[in-house]
Amino acid sequence: MLTLGDSPWCRPEMKGHFTLNCLFASQSNRKAISSGVSEFTTSHFYKIPDIIQNYICPRVSICMVSPPDEHGYVLFGTTIDYIKGTTDYCEVVIAQVNKYMPRTFGNSIKHVRDFTYFVECDEELPEIKSVDITETEMKIGKNCASLIHDGDCL
């Protein structure tokens, strides 16, 4: 399985063909961001749909969905954060149909007629592996925890 840092669109030879705009910086994409292969847009999580639609302005949406049910509906499963919204305004909407994507409830449903292309590819869902926490990170975490008291609202 590829990690985000190994993804084809993070590689220098893809520059000019694809632009990866990361909305979070993590161990898996810092190298691509710092080398200029990937862009980085920082924001509050709730602002991401607006930033994607009105500032990044993608033309293509690529998402992973469950197989369609007997009525032609697919579900976004674990990827229902902000990607579903891009399927409403992008010119091209490509869905990876993956039998491992769970069927979930809520606002995660879309009909097959709303997609431009389907690619069937059954693979385990992407997973970010845990990493060892450094001594500095542990100190930062303890400092943050000391500022939060019982009854505080985050």
Image: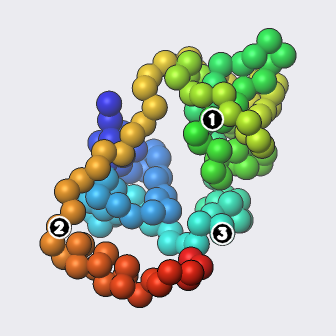
Q: The residue under label 2 is which amino acid type? A: Thr
Which of the numbered marks, if any, corresponds to residue 77? 1
Q: Is residue 116 left or right of residue 125?
A: right
Q: The residue under label 1 is which amino acid type? A: Gly
Q: Circle 2 sits on which residue?
A: 134
Q: Quadrant of residue 109?
A: top right
Question: Which of label 3 and label 1 is nearer to you?
Answer: 1
Q: Circle 3 sits on which residue?
A: 47
Q: Is residue 148 left or right of residue 33?
A: right
Q: Is residue 70 left or right of residue 121?
A: right
| Helix, strand or loop status at disc 3 | helix
Rounded to the nearest angstrom, the CA distance separating label 3 from label 2 is 30 Å
Residue 14 visible? The answer is no
Q: The residue under label 3 is which amino acid type? A: Lys
Q: In terms of depth relative to the viewer, which is nearer, 32 or 29?
A: 29
Relative vertical location of residue 99 with respect to residue 152 in this rendering, above or below: above
Rounded to the nearest angstrom, the CA distance separating label 3 from label 1 is 21 Å
**Circles 3 and 2 in contact, beta carbons < 8 Å:** no
| Helix, strand or loop status at disc 1 | helix
For this orientation, the residue located farthest to the bottom is 147
| Helix, strand or loop status at disc 2 | loop
Which quarter shows the N terminus?
top left
Residue 14's spot in the image, x, y percent?
37, 44
Q: Quadrant of residue 65?
A: top right
Residue drawn where x is 24% and y is 53% of the image: 131
Q: Is tag 3's residue or tag 1's residue first in the polypeptide sequence?
A: 3
Q: Is tag 3's residue or tag 2's residue first in the polypeptide sequence?
A: 3
For this orientation, the residue located farthest to the front is 150
Residue 123's spot in the image, x, y percent?
44, 22
